[in-house]
Amino acid sequence: MSEIYFLARYTPFWSIPGLLIAGEFAYLFWIRKKKRMILVCSSIALFCLVCTVAYYFAGGPEKSVKALMNFVWYLTR
């Protein structure tokens, strides 16, 4: 579980590059008309965007981990 908290704490360091890379590949596959790969890359880009927005709404590194801990506790009780 500590790996998940580590990823939540440092979300911008993996989600923003993932968003940019997946967005660029989605655009390239859109030009080539490869529908399945467009969906895969767009889904990855959307997931990264949602993670980044949730990170900033939670309040940064310390508060995002606390919010994730509360969410996990809520799901497991």
Image: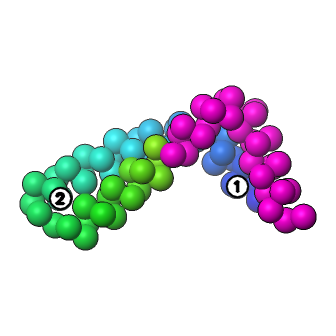
Taken as a whole, is the magenta stretch helix, strand or loop?
helix
What number is the disc on residue 56? none
- Badge 2 marks a residue whose secondary structure is helix
Give amino acid for label 1: Glu
Between residues 15 and 38, which one lies in front from this camera angle?
A: 38
The image quadrant where one finds the N terminus is bottom right
The verdict on residue 58 being magenta is yes
Q: Which residue is mark 1?
A: 3
Image point (75%, 33%), residue name: 62
Which residues, given as a range, are shown in magenta? 50-77
Q: Position of residue 18 (x, y in %)?
A: 41, 47
> Where, by quadrant of the figure, is residue 63 drawn?
top right
Q: Residues within 10 Å of mark 2 (few under 14, many from 20)?
A: some
Q: Which residue is mark 2?
A: 29
Image point (16%, 56%), residue name: 30
Badge 2 vs badge 1, beta-carbon distance below 8 Å: no
Residue 55, compared with residue 59, is above or below; it is: below
The image quadrant where one finds the C terminus is bottom right
The verdict on residue 76 being magenta is yes
Q: Name the side, left or right, on which 33 lies relative to 42.
A: left
Q: Name the side, left or right, on which 40 lies relative to 67.
A: left
Q: Position of residue 20 (x, y in %)?
A: 34, 41
Give amino acid for label 2: Phe
| Residue 14 seen in render | no
Q: Position of residue 12 (x, y in %)?
A: 53, 36
Image point (25%, 70%), residue name: 36
Q: Name the side, left or right, on which 69 lies relative to 47.
A: right
Q: CA distance from mark 2 to mark 1?
A: 32 Å
- Badge 1 marks a residue whose secondary structure is helix
